[in-house]
Amino acid sequence: MTKINNICCIGAGYVGGPTMAVIASKNPNIKVTVVDINEERIKAWNDEDLTNLPIYEPGLPEVVQKARGKNLFFSTQVDEAIAAADMVFISVNTPTKTYGKGKGMAADLKYVELCARQIARVATSDKIVVEKSTLPVRTAQAIKTILSETGNGVNFQILSNPEFLAEGTAIQDLEAADRVLIGGEQSPEGEEAIQALVNIYKAWLPEERILTTNVWSSELSKLTANAFLAQRVSSINAISELCEATGADVGEVAKAIGMDSRIGPKFLNASVGFGGSCFQKDILNLVYIAKSLGLVQVADYWEQVIIMNDHQKNRFAEKIVSTLFNTVADKKIAFLGWAFKKDTNDTRESAAIYVADKLLDEQAKITVYDPQVKETQMQRDLNYLQSRTEQENKENLTTTPDAYACCQEAHAIAILTEWDEFKKLDWQKIYDQMPKPAFIFDGRGILDEEKMKNIGFNYFVIGG
Ligand code: UDX
Ligand code: UDX
Ligand code: ADP
């Protein structure tokens, strides 16, 4: 029976950081070292002041405090940590390819491959390698090929252990996971490796929630779970447009269908569009895989989820422009929220970026307030789209550290993220400081429609 004493995790990001913090806190006898090539990030993970951790995640500082320096370490010494480990998690980023074959669709496996090669180079003892990043089906096979041809006599077992945590609730999702999925080779050695990882999760989760499958099922389950979740959002968003055209209310429809136990009530909030590092990337990946296999109908079916999401972001921006008498040129538009969802500082694929980009094309002046996202990040997000010069982005999109200042003198307010604090703002005060007519475009359906209308706002909500 393989007993794990020493874990190394390559990649100290949104997945690697919280996951390893929880594994370490639940397994005090296992030494866990999280490594990253990004020195600044590792420095932040090691900061005495826990408010400086590189990612904002409720409950994370407490878990880090419990284990850091005892059996949880953050380091840039990648080779040393790999060499010392019995089990190595690969938790590096796998963005959508921005070049070459599969550009805009396939996952870029550059970082994963580099990790595999690095492990192959430095390993002198047998290791279990766990793929934690979201990867296309059959990546484990590629990792295995790289590792098995090192010729130095070291044996590797490759496991797929996809992550299902959602940002903003990562600690809760890890500590009370619905399920943990572990895919491995169907051989005695494979079974032993699977069991070694099962034992780590068993430290805090009931065994019946730990599923074991073959590697390919595990990899495909991850893509499928995200595709289904994103599909629910696109489905309800499609209905939101129908509601706006007919006088039905999407909240009422969502409630009514959600009470059917076959459908269920979760993940039915109409919104300005889903964002985050996973949904779009994983679906594009699924579409790419289906296309590569010649499964045209399958590819088209899933691609529609992305098309609908793009449409939702666009039509929100267009609604703002058309409502403001077909021009937003030189008008101040206040954005409440920039993160892709509440309780995170992550902005990857956030709807706010695309809505801002469209409004900037229309020469609007945007001011943003987000409680956790820094201005440098917002500028980086916009510049990445290459729609205009960096200087123009800087001049036309600014931030303020205060929601009231953000909304002052604004022609319209757009709510892009559902931060709880937005519900508690003094909306009468905000109204009094705006030119009239004053508009709110609630992209998250978080405000009380009647109350807003009574104050005097022209209030528009997705699906209302
Ligand atoms: C997702 C999966 O939920 C998680 O299991 C996987 O490991 C990673 O991808 P994440 O992207 O962190 O997690 O957050 P999630 O809560 O799924 O939200 C994704 C996007 O969908 C957000 O932009 C969110 O605002 C949006 N969303 C979600 C809606 O618009 N409506 C909903 O009802 C739910
Ligand atoms: C459906 C709705 O379920 C019901 O609420 C509505 O009032 C009428 O339409 P029905 O068509 O009688 O009911 O049966 P249902 O169990 O929904 O099955 C519909 C079809 O889907 C069947 O052909 C069934 O075999 C198929 N199905 C259902 C699957 O192929 N897979 C499934 O997982 C579920
Ligand atoms: P995720 O959301 O998947 O966790 P992130 O981008 O937040 O993605 O984190 C991935 C981390 O992996 C980054 O901090 C990046 O610096 C790190 N990384 C990428 N490649 C390597 C590598 N070869 N060695 C060490 N760290 C790496």
Image (cartoon, rainbow, N blue to C red):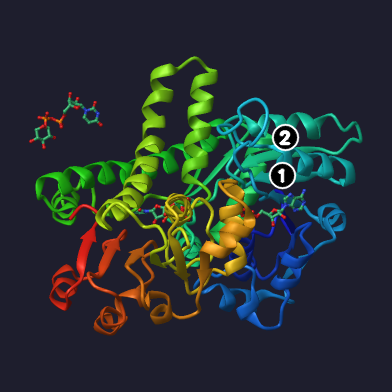
- The answer as to whether callout 1 falls within 8 Å of ligand 3 is no
Q: Ligand 2 is in which quadrant of the figure?
A: top left
> Would you identify the image quadrant in which residue 366 lies?
bottom left
Please name the amino acid that badge 1 sits on: Val
Decide if residue 117 is on the left or right side of residue 343: right
| Near-viewer residue (216 or 110) | 110
Numbered tag placed on residue 129 in the rendering: 1
| Near-viewer residue (4 or 423) | 423
Q: Residues within 10 Å of mark 2 (few under 14, many from 20)?
A: many
- In the picture shown, does residue 45 fall above or below 13? below
Decide if residue 216 is on the left or right side of residue 322: right
For the C terminus, the image quarter is bottom left
**Residue at mark 2 to residue at mark 1: CA–CA distance:** 9 Å
Decide if residue 68 is on the left or right side of residue 333: right
Give x and y (percent) for residue 113. Answer: 75, 38
- In the picture shown, does residue 208 fall above or below 302? below
Query: Mark 2 or mark 1: which is in front?
Result: 2
Q: In the displayed image of the protein, which residue is found farthest to the top? A: 294
Decide if residue 114 is on the left or right side of residue 356: right
Give x and y (percent) for residue 129. Answer: 71, 44
Q: Residues within 10 Å of mark 1 (few under 14, many from 20)?
A: many
Give x and y (percent) for residue 7. Answer: 73, 57
Circle 2 residue: 143
Residue at the spot 36% in from the left edge and 57% down from the top edge: 328
Element at badge 1? strand
Please name the amino acid that badge 2 sits on: Ile
Mark 1 and mark 2 in contact (Cβ < 8 Å)?
Answer: yes
Q: In the displayed image of the protein, which residue is found farthest to the left? A: 247
